[in-house]
Structures are given as C-alpha cells and as structure tokens.
Image: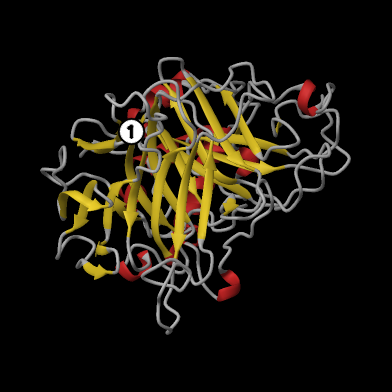
Amino acid sequence: MFYTLISLCNRVSQSQGFRTMKSVFGFMMLATLLISCSGESKEKNKRSSTTSPAEKSSKSFYHNNVNVASDVTVLFDWNDAGDQDTLWNGWLWQQNVAYSNEGWVLDTGGALGNAITTYFGQSPRSFDKSDYKDDNLVEIVSDVRAPSTSAGGSFRVFDNPNNNTAPKQASWWMYYAGKPLSERGVTSESTDRMSFYIKLEGLETKGPEGTPHSIGTNFHVGTYLCWETGKSVYSTGDGCPREGPGNQHYYHYLGFNPGAWLHVELDDHPNHHRGKRGNSYHNNNPVSDSGKSYFAQLSRFYFEIRAAQKQHSEFVVDELQFHSTKKSMEPNQNDESITSLWVGYWPNGNYWEIGFKDGGNFSVGEHKFSTFEIRWSTMPITNSNYDAAKIVTPEFYSGEKYVGANNPHYVRRANDYSRDVWTRFQLPQSVTSNYERVYFAIKDVSKKGENQGTSWPWNRDDHGDASSKYIRTIDYALKAND
C-alpha cells in the first residue's frame, strides 16, 4: 500500500494538470495526498530528515511549485523588457517628483491605468523618502532576482555612499497614490496578503546565541489607507486623495538578518497604529468597523530600514504581489497571533530563519509568554494535513530551557516584554538542493498552565490559551521553474 501511494504521488506530481490546476478544492485534495506521501509511515520508512532513493530517482517529483492562491495579482515585479537602472516600463523618471526628491511617476496608459492629478501632483508615484537626509538612491537591477522567478530584475534602494553624515537607513516610497489599490484592480475586499521577496545588506546582525536581546525590529512597512467620504477634502484625515478619514497610518514591524533572500507575507493585522501606545494590541483589519477592508483601501506604502546603521545599508525587493487566503489552499488561517510573517534561507551556511510578531490580544510583560510550533513540507500544508508535516527543530528559544521537556521542539517569544518571535533551523540538504519550493506552517500551541521552561524568566506558563486553532502558512522558493 505504501509503495502504491508513492507511485501515485509521483504520477500526480508529474502531470501537467497538477501544475496548472486552479481548483482550490483540488489543490487541497492533492496537498493532503502528497503531504501524506512525504510523511510516510514509520513501519515502511524510518527516515525523518533524508530523501528516499525512490524520490531521488524521479527528478520530476521535485517539481513541487504549487500556486497556493488563485487570485495572485502582481503590483511590481520589474520583469518587463527594458526595465533597467531608471528605465521602468509604464513609468517616467523625474529628478523632482516631490520635495526635490527623485523617482518615478506613472505614465498615462501604463499597466496600472491612467495617471491622475491630485493636490500633491501626478499620481501614483514612487520616490525617495528622505526623512533622514539620507539621499537614497535607486536602480532597477536587471540581473538580480528573487529565487521565485527566473526572469526580469529587481528594485534596489541604497543610501548614498558619499553621504557619511546621514544615519545610513535606506528608505523609499514604494507606491504613493491618491486612491486605493482596489480602484486600480490590484486588491479587492477579500485581499489579506501582501507578499514580496527582499534581501538586505548593511544591517547589524541579530545575536547568534538567541539571547533575549538579540531580536527586535530593524525594518518596517508603513501603510496609509483612504476612502472617499462624499465631503470636501481639505487636509490629512479627510479621505482620498489624502489619508483617512481619520488616522489611517499603520506599521508592520519586521526583524531581519542581512545576506539572504527573505519571503515576507504581511497580513491585514498591523503591528502599530500611529499615535497609539507601542506593543499594544491592534485589531485585525482595523477598518472593519467602517465596513472597509485593509488592503482594499491601501493607497500608499513605504519600505524603511528602521534604525540608523553603522554601515551603508540597502535592500533589494522583487515579486511584490497581493492575494487572498479565501482563494488559497487554506482559507482558515491564524492572523491573530501570527502576524508579519517571514522566512529566509542562507545557502552558504545551509540554515533557515523564520520570524513573526505575536499580535494576540494581551498586554506584554508581567511574565506573559506564548508558545508556537513550526512544521514544514515539500507540499502545501493545510489545517487538515498539518499533523503529517515534518516538525522543525528550532535552534533558538526552544528546548527544555524555554518550553520544558514535554515538547522541546516548541518555540517561544524571546522575552515577555516583546511580541517578537524568531529562530534559526536547518532542513535536509536533499530538500534544499532538489526541490523548487518548501512550505511552512506555524501553529499557536499556547496553553494556560503549560510550556514552562527550566530557566527564568521562561519558567512561567503561557499567558493564556492559543488565540486561534488554525495554522498560519508561508512558502519559500528555492529555485524558479525554468
């Protein structure tokens, strides 16, 4: 029976229908079948972290690049022929886009539709966010791209190497417009994911020992929402083409290490709201009370290295997309306590890192901890097949010291006064060398009265039960389909 299942898996994975199927239900059935294959019974296969000879002999079995959502919409990928340096198809380069800062404005008739004229000039635009007098520079690099694509270039932002008095924190208005993305057909009311690949250089690295102070926020995405109110617009907070109505500026906080491509998936649960108390709870989809959807109303956003760096800093962005989990392999996901999720792979060291923010509804501090489990597979993971996926063994914030002896593979927040979760781990070289993509899922396994570690302050139990019974998923491209 086992070998029959493996044979079936190979035939399914080789079929053209598998690679092109759009049915979410069909995807879920295939994922459940194939993840069961990769989970293999202990009686028939004792391995836990190596690839079987049968898998090695079938190269086509490694074509596991499954589209996890059926409504992916690309905002930017810098893949058009001729995209290079300041040449960007559909956009016009200008030395003074705004406030004497250089950048691009949308050309009339471009891929996003027509440009419009607003109180701040031509819209949309993409330009230097020189808040720190850093004189940021930018170029489209035609021969550098994320591992998720085999074509096109990427978008490089770097601080001016000749400016030694600035704080060396690269930043850029990636998209600045006077109306929401939904009005340009990029997002919809169901959109709840912003996905992109990013690689950073010049950042101070997080401590490799996994100490309580080795993690924090060094990068953030700032977002602005707007919608029309039917009233006259005079100032910020009045609505499109300005921000608002009301205070509609939010932040997604991230903590990265440099030197590798990272896949980031932001959700509609921001980590901060302008003017509010830091480290506090913020609603998932904070505009739902107004009958709105977060990404549907997104009108502008910037990327920024959050703190001054000792070295000149830069980031390269590629494959900036939006999609909805409602049209994905797994529509029921935990966006409550697992937010601003990212994962990355460092090939030179053959290790991975994963991080996110615990956005649960509690106040940090007072010995309040949360606990999580991470699993991986070579096929998409769903709530139904989660237990068949392989367990990740974290190097940091895991083991008896942090989570006790019952489930030493669990991972905890680094400390009780921060919402950061971050760890490092390894996967079999046979996977990273032979598969196109790896799929990850995280589950909140917090339980009041449990998961006490053996060392202070982690010898405290969880602050409460898990915020959600569902998993949170993300994938990572090891190499693109040719």
The residue identified by callout 1 is: 147
Q: Residue furthest bottom?
A: 230
Regarding residue 54, the answer to whether it shows in the image is: no
Quadrant hosting residue 409: top right
Identify the secondary structure beneath mark 1: loop
| Residue lying at 47% horizontally and 66% vertically, measured from the top left | 190
Regarding residue 271, the answer to whether it shows in the image is: yes
| Residue lying at 85% horizontally and 28% vertically, measured from the top left | 459
Residue 133 vertical placement versus 347 (above, below): below
151 left or right, relative to 256 = left
Nearest the camera: 375 or 278?
Answer: 278
Residue 69 position in % (x across, y down): 42, 54
Q: Residue furthest right?
A: 449
Q: Quadrant of the N terminus?
A: top right
Question: Label 1 crowding class (10 Å Cα cut-off): few <14, some 14-19, many 20+?
Answer: many
Residue 9 position in % (x across, y down): 45, 39
What amino acid is found at the position of numbered circle 1 in the picture? Pro
Nearest the camera: 92 or 146?
Answer: 92
